[in-house]
Amino acid sequence: MSDTNLQAIASFWKAWLPVMALAFAAFIFNTTEFVPVGLLPSIAESFNMNVAHTGLLITGYAWMVTIMSLPLTIITAKIERRLLLVILLIIFITSHLLAWLAWSFTSLMAARIGIACVHAVFWAITTPLAVRIAPFYKKAKALSFIVTGSSLATVLGVPIGTVIGQHAGWRITFLLIGLIALLVMVVLIWLLPKLPSSHAGSLKSLPSLFKRPALINVYILTAIIVTGHFTAYTYISPFMRDVGFSKNFVVFLLLIIGGAGILGSIIFTKTTAKYPIGIFMSSIMILLACLLMLYLCAFSHITTTLLCIIWGSAMTIIALSLQTKVLDVAPDASDVAISMYSGIFNIGIGGGALMGSIVLSHSDTSYVGYAGAIYLLIALLMFIFISRRYWLQQYQLPPDSK
C-alpha cells in the first residue's frame, strides 16, 4: 500500500473517530431506552403486574425526557462538552446500578427517571456535536453515523438485551448496560477533544425559535408521527406473541427493525440532497401503509419480516429528515432547538406507549397498528396541505419539486 493511501486512511480515521465515539454512545442510550420493549413481559411477571401497566416504564421515561430536555440543556449550556458527557455517563451508570438492584416497580421507575434526565441532555448536545466535529460539508454523513449507532441499538442492543433478560433475568440486562456505559465513557475521554460550548442557545433564543413557522411545523409533525409509530412498536412483542410467533422470532423481528434503520440511513444519505421533500413524504406514506398492513401481514414469517424491514427503514428516514430540518432552520441555537426536538420526540414515544396501552385495555393487540396509522394519516395530510410550503421555502425549490 502506498504512502498516499496510508495517509488517506489515517486522515479518515482521525476525522471520523470522534464522530464514531459519539455514535457508540448513541448506541448505549438507545439500547437502554428501548430495551424494556422486549422485557415488558418479564418485568411485569416479576412485579405481579400486567404488561399494560409496566408500559409506564416507557411512557414515564419518555415524558421525563420531554419535561427535562429544555431546562437541563439550558442549565448545562456553558459546560465544556467532553466534561459534560463524562458527568452524564457517571449518572447514567449509577442509575443502571439502581435498576439492577430495584426492589420494587417504584424503585425501578426511579432509576429510569434518572436515566431519562441524562438522556434529555445527551440527545440535545450529541447531534450538534457530531455535525460540529465532522469534516466540513459532511453534515448528512455525520448524522448518518449517529443514526447508525442508534439503529445498531435495535439491531444488537435491544434483541441481545431481550435474550439476556429472558434467560438470566431483566436485572442482568440493566447491569450489563451500565458496565458497557463505563467502557463508553473511557472511549469518549480518550477520543474526544475538548469542546467548548458553542451555539448552544439560551432562554433568549426561545422567542426567536417560536417565530419560525418551519420549525414549529417540524415539531408538530414529530409529535404526531412518533406517537403513531410507538403506538404499534411499543407493544410489538406481545402483538407478535398473540398472533402465534415464538419468543425467538420476536427477537429476530426486533433485530430486523433495527437493521432496517441502517438501510434507511444509507438511503437518506444518498437521496436527501436531491430529494429532501420527496424522500420525507414518501416515507410517511410507506410507514402509514406498514401500520395499516401490520395485522394482515402477521400470519406469515416472510410477510412479517418484509414489513418490518420497510417499517424500520421508513421511520429512520423520517427521523433523520426531521432532525436535519431542525438544524437547517435553527443553526444559531442548535442545542436548544434539538433539545426541544428531543423532548417532543419523547412526547411521541410516551404518547404512543400510552395510546397502545389504552388500545390493549379496551380491545387487544391486533388494533395497535390501526390506531398508529390514524396518526400517520394526520401527519401526511398536514405535511401536504400545511408544512410542505415551509420546506419548499427553506430549500428554495420550485412548487413542483420532488
Image (cartoon, rainbow, N blue to C red):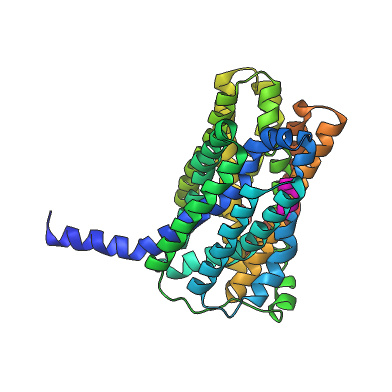
**Number of numbered discs overlaid on the protein picture:** 0
Up the image or down, 233 lies above or below 242; here it is below
**Front one among 114 and 347:** 114
Q: Position of residue 360 (x, y in %)?
A: 81, 32
- Please, which residue is most extreme toward the right here? 362
Q: Main secondary structure of the magenta part?
A: helix
Which residue lies at the image location 49% right of the left edge and 48% below the top edge?
265
Residue 23: x percent and y percent?
47, 56
What percent of the width, then of the height, locates residue 206? 72, 75
As drawn, is 357 to the left or to the right of 271? right
Residue at the far left: name it: 2
Please say if 70 is above or below 104: below
| Identity of the residue drawn at 56% across and 31% down | 167
User: Which region shows up in magenta?
Assistant: 57-62
Q: Residue at x 55, y 48 (%)?
A: 175
* Most foreground residue, 206 or 150: 150
Left or right: where 262 falls relative to 30: left
Residue 325, magenta (yes or no): no
Q: Quadrant of residue 40?
A: top right
Where residue 377 sits, quadrant-wise, is top right
- Whether residue 378 is visible, yes or no, is no
Residue 310 percent coordinates (x, y): 56, 34
User: Taking 211 as reference, is 229 above or below it?
Assistant: above
Residues 10 and 44: in front is 44
Answer yes or no: is residue 62 visible. yes
